[in-house]
Amino acid sequence: MSAGRVHRPETLEEATALLGELDDVMVYGGGTAIQILRKQGLLFTEDYVDIAGIPGLRDLTVTDDDITIGTLVPLRRVETDPRTRRLVPVAAAAYGQAANPRVRNTASAGGNIAHGDYRLDPPTALVVLDATVHLASAAGSREVAVREFFTDFQETDVRHGEMITAITVPRQPDGSRSSFVKMRSLSENDWPCASAAVLAVPEDGFVEIRMGLGAVAPTTVYLAFDVTPDMDEQQAVEAALDIADSVMDPIADIRGSASYKARLGRVAVEQAVRSSLKELSRD
Amino acid sequence: MNEITLDVNGTPHKVAVEDTTLLLDALRRRVGVTSAREGCGVGACGACTVLAEGRSVSSCLAVAVRYDGTPLTTADGLPEDDPVVSSFVDSDAMQCGYCIPGFVLMTKELLSENPSPNDEEVSDHLEGNICRCATYPEIIKAVRLAAKRSAT
Amino acid sequence: MTEVLPDAQPAGTRQAETEPRYGVGERRKRFDALGRVRGTIRYTGDEANPPGTAFVGVHRSTAPHARIVAVHTEDALAIEGVLAVVTGRDLHEVLGDRIYTGPAFADQPCLAVDKTRFVGEAIAAVLATDPDIARAAADEIAVEYEELPPVYDIDDALRGEAFVHEELRPSSVFADLAHLHGVRGTNVNYEYRQILGDAAAERERAATTVSATTWAPPTHHVPIELPSTSAWVDSGRLEMLSTTQTPSYVRQTVSDLLDIPLSRVRIMTRPLGGSFGCKMYDRLEPLAAALAWTTGRRVRIDATREDAFLLTTRHGARVTGSMSADADGNIVAVTSDVRYDTGAFADVGPRIAAKSGLVAPGPYRIAAVDVRSRCIYTNKVSAGPFRGFGVPQVTWSHETLIDELARELGEDPYRFRRRHLLREGDIATVGTKMHSADFLTCIDEVTKAVGWDDPTPRGDGRWVHGKGVAVGMKAVLTPTIANATLNLNQDGSATLLISTVDMGQGSDTIMSQIVGEVLCLDSRRIHVVRADTDATPYDTITAGSRSTYHTGNAVRLVAEAMRSKLLGFAAERWGVPADELVLDAQGVVHEAKELRDSLPDLVRAKFGARGATVTTAENFTSWWVPYDHDTGLSEKVTEHWFAGAAAVRLAVDTWTGRIRTQHLAIAGDVGRAINPTLVEQQLTGAAIMGIGHTLFDEMVFDQGQITNATMLDYQLPSIKDLPEKLTPVIVESAHRDGPFGAKGVGETTILPIAPAYAGAVRDACGVRITTLPLTPERVLNHLADAADPGKAGR
């Protein structure tokens, strides 16, 4: 790319000041999506705020309750870090399916969700885990539940002047089991045609099923319901499909018609729910 | 313009690049590297793969200024007796060869993380590299052989 | 699996060496294997750009069919670093109608002159000091169009309401197209007919007839190396370095375009980073030559991936066909109406329509055929050659038909084919006798490999299993011309000059193996010079799987001539008749007189100099009998045939429609494998490419515009798309005139893949799919239709 101005602030304050002052501006994190969109002639932003020089944004920190993923943490680190694999396996699984390993080395956790693409894998896990997105601006910082973060087709709750600084992901509840299923319609390394992250959380005889669906609606979708003690696996699956059906609104493209993507969405939901419940029953 | 140092295979190269100059263009046009190549421009084929501190990067999606001083490895920087290089040669893992340096570097990264990968782990790691000649059967053999050679 | 070959030891040689020679039949490595692995061999785009190089950016049409009213270049010219902007009209003023080039029709302007014919056609070129500036400036060019009614597909084209070209302009290359000159009011630029017997009457009488309309969509080659061409003028000569499979053709085109003698054109090549047919004929080369010649600058054009999708494609093709059997199950009639969508330019489409039309009935004993194969213009990106040269599209038809016919008759698809396949000495429907095309061994081997008669797993309710088989038949490009020049160096090494381009198939390696075999030299001591028209002799093209046979024969001949020459040197020196001498790995020997001389000593004695060279040159030209204009029949339509087969066992996910390949076996009759490793790579490589064409590989158009022209959206087989098991089988039915019995192999196994899969899907779940690719959604839709009696049908 030949055009474009790049600003390289060294502190968060400088960065948020720039983001507030400039009109047509984007945060440059890992940069993979920005480069692809620019090369495809879909992005004409003039100013970029390169946040690589700001300390602390690459940290992955673990507390008793949660994991905080700095905005610049590469997707591949979320996938491979032993702590994420142990504490939030559904996130490790979903992050490990995005693009390919090489792109995951560069693409950043913050940029991934800032992109707001409805097809992305990681957000499906973030919504089931009830993650929180940390945003900063010149006016201060705020937090948004990731379930509220994706507002519309390729739109997020990031406001002008704000940037993502981190994502906090609660540990998967004790005794819970999860599954991430990605369906493709073209080659085996293609974008998803539908994906589902499912977390099954047992509590007092009930099992709470939390589902994050990707690529089957204009945004990532979060759904949850309880499997009551009188329901068997088949009934749980049917309940999951019923509520999944109510939200599915896929976008037709070269990867399939809306009805086909909805069908794959159902298969993804069924597989992920069955797999999670089977894991639970094995415990 | 930014004056940066690209440390390619242990040799520092001082180069002037724009803020937005891609690492691939800097390596090819300023340093003279030819083993990293543009195939798709969007990170989907792996022909432009380089290693930065041992980690694979699509140099067609990376800006050069980010790699000022970072140790970079390109396939031509690997010695002839490197176990991955020799395994690809001995397995006839090439046809036109255009994509092969990318596969070699991905294999270097894989074996550094996982010295004895199973076939699924091999294909998980190489899935983002396209060999249009479809030399995949020989590439899989080469990775297995490289794992064996690296272990001894 | 391989028949015993006659003793291939050339006369006048004998086995005496102890060291390996890496000759014919050996699994020798590519000489540059290490360079390919470490990335140190140099491809075209790796050459440095001398100071003063002008980089070219191309402005492309946004209209599918329109008159060009005006091209505004001022904004582009105002950009710093822009050296010049050139339009089609500018070039036309200098070059006139010579600006229109093409292998069959002179219909491709390197820049559109007065009319644009597809979205993406080159309209104007920017020359700039930097490639990024050139591309950015190209975006600043504004074109005013007057829209014309577009012709988006073959149905539009045949309705004949709008015409892509006002009149047909056959080029001077093919005499049989001359009658089309000046024809107006049509989008059909070529039609091939094959008439054998009375197919309509036979069909009428037949006991059983099956019919199908098949569609194979346009696809793209997507070699990972992007096209790149540099051109410059040196002392009144046009010199060029380009990514091309056809240096000899390009030389002639540039000579014609610039109206200068062949001696003033030089085309150089490097190894290609893959091609598969897309770097052939008129791609970037006419534009580069015209720009260098008219501006005097050294120019370099590097296609981006998006540009590459706009340079050429594989033909989309629809075939409406039928196959009929009598009460005894004999095939009595085949009809086939083949329509190739060639896009805006004919390119080599007319040849594709003919060469594919002649095998459209399939490699079977058939009493009567009626084939009509047409090449049709539309307002889309131009289609050209692609591995298989149109034959995969007709194979998709005839193998669909015979599979359905077998099932209709309650017969096993393998054994039914086997019963009817052409045998050695049979006459194909086109009228040509079969030789060295062992379909029976091919189909026997692949079915054996996948355990054809083993029970098929029952499945689990979600997954269902099936098996399929298919064959493919293709004629080698004929007639063609190959030349070879060999320099034996005084030290006993050799330098071979040929114009074959190594694009991954390993031609440099096998050609040196042929020389080594004849001259009893270690083939690794033989260097093959990269095609450079100033040095290497004319060779028709590197395509159509013709090089092993044609160029290989020229190479064999030139090595044999060298052997004779060397024996002659020794005969003269020793005063003995040459026919008493033999050449072996130690040199020339007269056994009875116990005379022996090494090649270095012999050559040094002859010329009295170290480093001297001995040169021989030879030609090999194949011949044919042109097919009859009315019947399309010929007693020798081709020099030889390619015969291949595929068998597959797969599972279909009835929830998603996705196909999982459990075992794919492929076989090709290669005559003789000069290098079995390279042969296996061609067999498996073509098969995996065929899997892509079968399952997902497709160019998607919306109103004539490609909508998936990036490698994010245009999907190719990845390492994860491999069959769980893949078995290549080399079949060797030696060709009487092949070099050591050999024929080519690059296209053989791409032919039968799609129909083998579709047959297996039919076997697994009872649905016959006739539209490619077999995407999961398409499979699922067919399953749904089959389950719904109201929508039953195909």
Image (spheres, coloured by chain):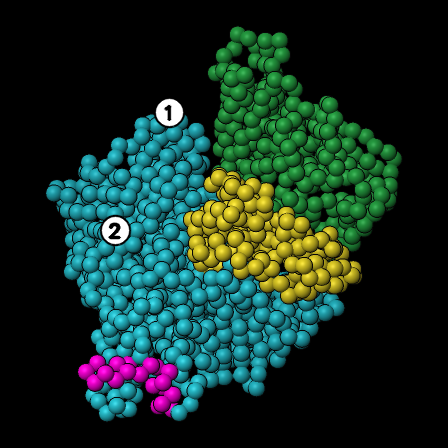
Q: Nearer the viewer, residue A197 or C775?
A: A197
Residue labelled with disc 1: C461
Find numbered disc 2 in the image and state the secondary structure of the residue it sits on: helix
Q: Residues within 10 Å of mark 1 (few under 14, many from 20)?
A: few
Give the number of callouts: 2
Q: Nearer the viewer, mark 1 or mark 2?
A: 2
**Among the chains, which one is yellow?**
B
Res. A210 in view: yes
Q: Which color is chain A depicted in?
A: green
Q: Quadrant of residue C484?
A: bottom left
Find numbered disc 1 in the image and state the secondary structure of the residue it sits on: loop
Residue at mark 1: chain:
C
Q: Quadrant of the C terminus of chain C?
A: top left
Q: Where does residue C76 sit, x and y in percent of width and height?
A: 70, 66
* Residue found at the far front of this picture: C594
Q: Nearer the viewer, residue C633 or C537?
A: C537
Q: Which color is chain C depicted in?
A: cyan
